[in-house]
Image: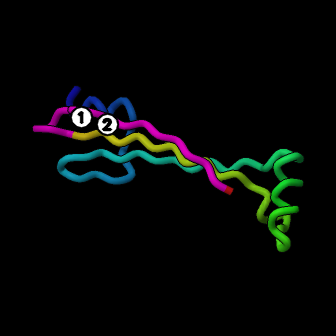
Amino acid sequence: MTRDEAVRLLGAPRLETPSQLYYGQTLKTPMDPETRKRFSRLRPNFTDDDAWIYEYRIIMLRLDKGRVSSFTVSRSSSS
């Protein structure tokens, strides 16, 4: 697949270098009641503003001579 085909499928990358296209997204979802209760016991200053889970989704395409040579898909979450 060429670089242009990848951009047509995935849209504009967040970051682009001559050898990489980087796509990233952050999702913010509220904690479920059990997780919220556990965090409030672990952190004495825990507030409603802290009761969120952040999930990071990343796709990184590596380019070689204008063509996709490999890609990495990852996902992680934090609170």
Residue at the extreme front of the image, as rendered: 42
Few, some or many residues within 10 Å of mark 2 (<14, 14–19, 20+)? few
Tell me if 1 is positioned left or right of 48 in this view: left
Q: Nearer the viewer, residue 35 or 18?
A: 35
Give yes or no for residue 40 being in the magenta stretch: no
Task: Name the secondary structure under disc 1.
Answer: helix
Tell me if 36 is positioned left or right of 25 in this view: right
Tell me the residue at 10%/38% (across/down): 65
Query: Split into 4 quadrants, where in the image is the N terminus?
Result: top left
Q: Nearer the viewer, residue 35 or 64?
A: 35
Q: Nearer the viewer, residue 12 or 58?
A: 58
Residue type highlighted by circle 2: Val
Magenta residues?
A: 63-78
Tell me if 32 is positioned left or right of 62 in this view: right
Residue at the extreme bottom of the image, as rendered: 45
Few, some or many residues within 10 Å of mark 1 (<14, 14–19, 20+)? some
Q: Position of residue 30 (x, y in %)?
A: 78, 50
CA–CA distance in space, label 1 to label 2: 5 Å
Pointer 1 with pointer 2, Cβ within 8 A: yes
Q: Position of residue 59 (x, y in %)?
A: 41, 40
Q: Where does label 1 land, which residue?
A: 4
Tell me the residue at 17%/33% (across/down): 67
Judged by its main secondary structure, the magenta piece is strand
Tell me the residue at 85%/54% (across/down): 38
Tell me if 37 is positioned left or right of 30 in this view: right
Q: Position of residue 49 (x, y in %)?
A: 79, 65
Query: Split into 4 quadrants, where in the image is the C terminus?
Result: bottom right
Q: Where does label 2 land, which residue?
A: 7
Task: Name the secondary structure under disc 2.
Answer: helix
Residue type highlighted by circle 1: Asp
Tell me the residue at 14%/38% (across/down): 64
